[in-house]
Image: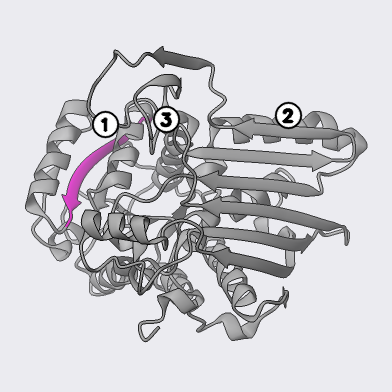
Amino acid sequence: MTQLPKQTLRVGFVGSGFIAHFHLKSMIGVRNVEVTGVFSRKPENREKFAKEVAALGLGTCRTHESLEVLLTADDVDAIWILSPNYTRLDVMRSLHKAIKEGRSKVFAVACEKPLARTVAEAREMLSLAEDAGLNHGYLENQVFCTPVLRGKEIIWRRAASTTGRPYLARAAEEHSGPHEPWFWQGDKQGGGVLSDMMCHSVEVARYLLTAPGAPRNSLKIKAVNGTVANLKWTRPNYAEQLRKRFGSEVDYRKRPSEDFARATVTLEDQDGNELMIEATTSWAYVGAGLRIQLELLGPEYALEYNSLSTGLKIFMSREVKGSEGEDLVEKQNAEQGLMPVLEDEAGVYGYTDENRHMVECFRKGGKPLETFEDGLAVVEMLMGLYRSAEINATLNFPAPELEHYVPVVARRSA
């Protein structure tokens, strides 16, 4: 649909919320890219986003009053879908239609995690991208975290090559709860913390266990076992906090989504070796801020990473007073005491390398490390975990019943 390679990739953003600004900040570390357009529901958010693009020196960003106008703009080559979960399939359908009708010159699309709320939705996202001839990338930033990339390279080159492949990956991600009300609403988000954060954990673990250069499907999913629970936010005082913060649509006394999830995923490699993923996620963690913990274990070695074990820490006494913020670490919970500081959140969390990789693959016509195929595989794991938790039993794969499965907390009639 276009001459490749392109000297500069011109990107249009769908969405201008928290995650969109994270991606935007990371783009200052990406070459050969301009952010040329944005569409989101609120005009004031679009204007704020365009001004930030200008301030960061990332090009001239036009604000668009409709999705259709963005998708058919003559200065947009690729779309970054960063809008809420419940909007993503409609965005993809609109993009597919515009391309098939010859009204759009877009040739690549990237979508934030999770790819969709159900297996059926994820499969349609992939089908639409491929039918439209789009190059597609799944935006799973933890796969591109700098410690993940460096750690995997060392482990597989020095340790696995001499004593055998890794066999156990552990991943955990925890914070005190999401920013926006739709995250807390099961039908809009697709679930609770399992959908929101376990998508990171199972995929970064699967990536660490995959041999360098091997396709991700070289590891076959054999079974999943999941547990979900409501530990904090259904307690009356915390449910009331949510209601006051987000309004009557978020009522955890009547309609909660899980704030804790545990997963065990059994896989098999090409030689028949059994591998394991253990993962936990929660919205019930109160510490300095967002905490990501990773481990990779093999016959004679181990990898460990904790995002809050930073090299830079700052102490502030009771006399230091100020407004609440997130200037030290994402989901920051305090402004006093001994605080870890992430000097470059966009880099450490993987957004910079992720976007650099996607831009170069799209610009040159290469296949990204993470595609919609991987996004579909992640959703299949998530739905398997939800179903396992619902029936209180291990679910063996393949599991065709997951195709149209909807988690209990996401069912509109629940």
Q: Which mark is residue 154?
A: 2
Q: Secondary structure at mark 1?
A: loop
In the rendered view of the protein, which quadrant contains the C terminus? bottom left
* Residue 108 appears in view: no
Q: Position of residue 221 (x, y in %)?
A: 72, 66
Relative to 69, is 237 on the left or the right?
Answer: right
Residue indicated by mark 1: 324
The residue that appears at 11% across and 55% down in the rendered structure is: 42
Magenta-colored segment: predominant secondary structure: strand
| Residue range highlighted in magenta | 30-40
Q: Nearer the viewer, mark 3 or mark 1?
A: 1
Amino acid identity at mark 2: Ile
Mark 1 and mark 2 lie on one chain; the one further toward the N terminus is 2
- At label 3, counting other C-alpha atoms closer than 10 Å, the crowd grade (few under 14, some 14-19, many 20 or more) is many
Task: Look at the picture and state if 179 lies above or below 103.
Answer: above
Q: CA distance from mark 3 to mark 2?
A: 23 Å
Q: Position of residue 10 (x, y in %)?
A: 26, 44
Indicate whether 233 appears above or below 173.
below
Category of crowding for the residue at label 1, using alpha-carbon neighbours closer than 10 angstroms: few (below 14), some (14–19), many (at least 20): few
Which mark is first along the chain, 2 or 3? Answer: 2
Which of discs 3 and 2 lies nearer the camera? The answer is 3
Disc number placed over residue 167 in the picture, else none:
none
